[in-house]
Amino acid sequence: MQCPKCKGDLETKEHQHIRVQRCNKCYGLFLEAHMLNETFAEWMAESFLDVGAISLGKKYDKIDDISCPICEVAMDKIEDPVQTHIWMESCPKCNRVFLDAGELTDLKYETFSDKLKNLLKGRRKRDKAGA
Ligand SMILES: [Zn+2]
Ligand SMILES: [Zn+2]
């Protein structure tokens, strides 16, 4: 399956019972919406699945007119209600979502307390311009 953003290949990656498609070029993640909750529930799942550099994700975040590689319909851009800087593409037909590299990790840690988030900031690269 071809990546809707960069035309790389989407490869199936599995961690425990979680299954996602990951692009071998831009490291975007394509997964069923309910799998998102699974990755949030599974300790450290994002570190196995969301391995792309945040800078890479930022680059591909600018591409937003993509089509679902399965249904071949235009995907909707949806905003995370908590973290409004995160936009993800969602397929209106199969409900799969596409996340750029780094976004899964970003989404997951917003669900934890601010205290833990501050703790993690040290090892996460932050784009100063984007803050
Ligand atoms: Zn890609
Ligand atoms: Zn679809």
Image: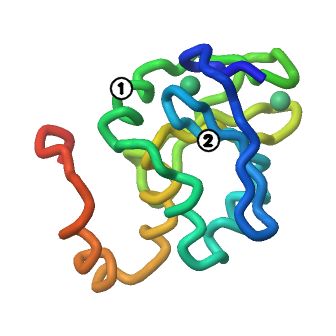
- Mark 2 element type: strand
- Here the colouring is rainbow
Judging depth in this view, the residue of 13 and 96 nearest the camera is: 13
- Mark 1 element type: helix
The quadrant of the rendering that contains the N terminus is top right
Locate residue 81, reporting x and y percent.
Answer: 52, 55
Q: Name the residue under label 1.
A: 59
Above-or-below relation of 106 to 2? below
Q: How crowded is mark 1: few (under 14 residues within 10 Å), some or many (20 or more)?
A: few
Does residue 101 appear left or right of residue 89 in this picture? left
Does residue 62 appear left or right of residue 28 in this picture? left
Residue type highlighted by circle 1: Lys
Where residue 117 sits, quadrant-wise, is bottom left
- Disc 1 residue lies near ligand 1 with CB under 8 A: no
Above-or-below relation of 3 to 112? above
- Disc 2 residue lies near ligand 1 with CB under 8 A: no
CB contact under 8 Å: marks 2 and 1: no
Judging depth in this view, the residue of 11 and 131 nearest the camera is: 11
Does residue 41 appear left or right of residue 109 in this picture? right
Where residue 56 sits, quadrant-wise, is top left
Q: Mark 2 points at which residue?
A: 29
Locate residue 112, reporting x and y percent.
Answer: 44, 79
Q: Which residue is drawn at 44% across and 43% down?
A: 52
Residue type highlighted by circle 2: Leu
Q: Residue at x 69, y 30 (%)?
A: 10
Q: Distance between the residues labelled 2 and 1?
A: 14 Å
Q: Mark 2 or 1 closer to N-term? A: 2
Above-or-below relation of 17 to 28? below
Instruction: Point out which mark residue 11 bears.
Output: none
Locate residue 69, reporting x and y percent.
Answer: 78, 22
